[in-house]
Amino acid sequence: MSSAEQYIKTEHPVIDSDPHFNRVVGYMRASDLATWGAATAAAPAILLGLERLRPGAGPKGINLALKVATGLGFMGGFLLAYQNSSLRFWGWSENAREQEMNRDEMAKRVAAGLPVYGEPTMDEASQAAAARNSKYAAIKFSAIPWFNTTNHKYHLSESTPNDK
């Protein structure tokens, strides 16, 4: 599977079409973290607002509902922040900061003699399957949250021409 098979023309340079989970979280901006925090706070706030409009449970019943709403807001906020960070890796939104961070990270890995995208621990067929399953997975979070947690060699990166 070559990286040209899943080529998508983008306005900004592609950093990585299938970034590892740790890279996506590590490259999150303050705006992503604010989005995550806002979603975490908004879910119980919305529940309290709806509870004021039409009370459904007594004072004891709302405690569990608030805990569940906070948990769902936390998870939903994380998925939204992760997706926003992934969009920058794919070149779908402005990514100048991430390009610079990527150049620095890759230069350090090359200088240290490490593989650019990490040391693969699976055979060739498993790497290809893992790449096919996780590439652009962040746009399918509504169906199933799926992250790239494997090291493989199937990455479309900024070294690939972006003018096709």
Image (spheres, helix red, strand yellow):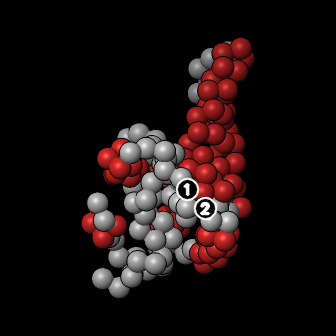
Question: Residue 136 at what x, y percent from top left?
Answer: 40, 56
- Element at label 2: loop
Q: Where does label 2 land, which residue? A: 114
Mark 2 near mark 1, Cβ–Cβ under 8 Å? yes
* Residue 59: percent from left, percent from top: 72, 17
Amino acid at circle 1: Gly
Spatial distance from mark 2 to mark 1, Cα to Cα?
Answer: 7 Å
Which residue is located at x 66 percent, y 56 percent? 26
Expressed as whole percent of the image width and height from the top left, the position of residue 93 reads 51, 72
Q: Amino acid at mark 2?
A: Leu
In-front residue for pair 60/98: 98
Please rate how many residues cluster around mark 2, counting C-alpha atoms within 10 Å: few if below 14, some from 14 to 19, many from 20. few
| Farthest residue, direction bottom | 163
Which label is found at residue 63? Answer: none
Residue at the extreme front of the image, as rendered: 113
Position of the C terminus by quadrant: bottom left
Residue identified by numbered label 1:
118
Q: Nearer the viewer, residue 132 or 44?
A: 132
The N terminus appears in which quarter of the rendering?
bottom left
Image-based side of 39 in relation to 131, left or right: right
- Write down the quadrant of residue 54 in the picture: top right
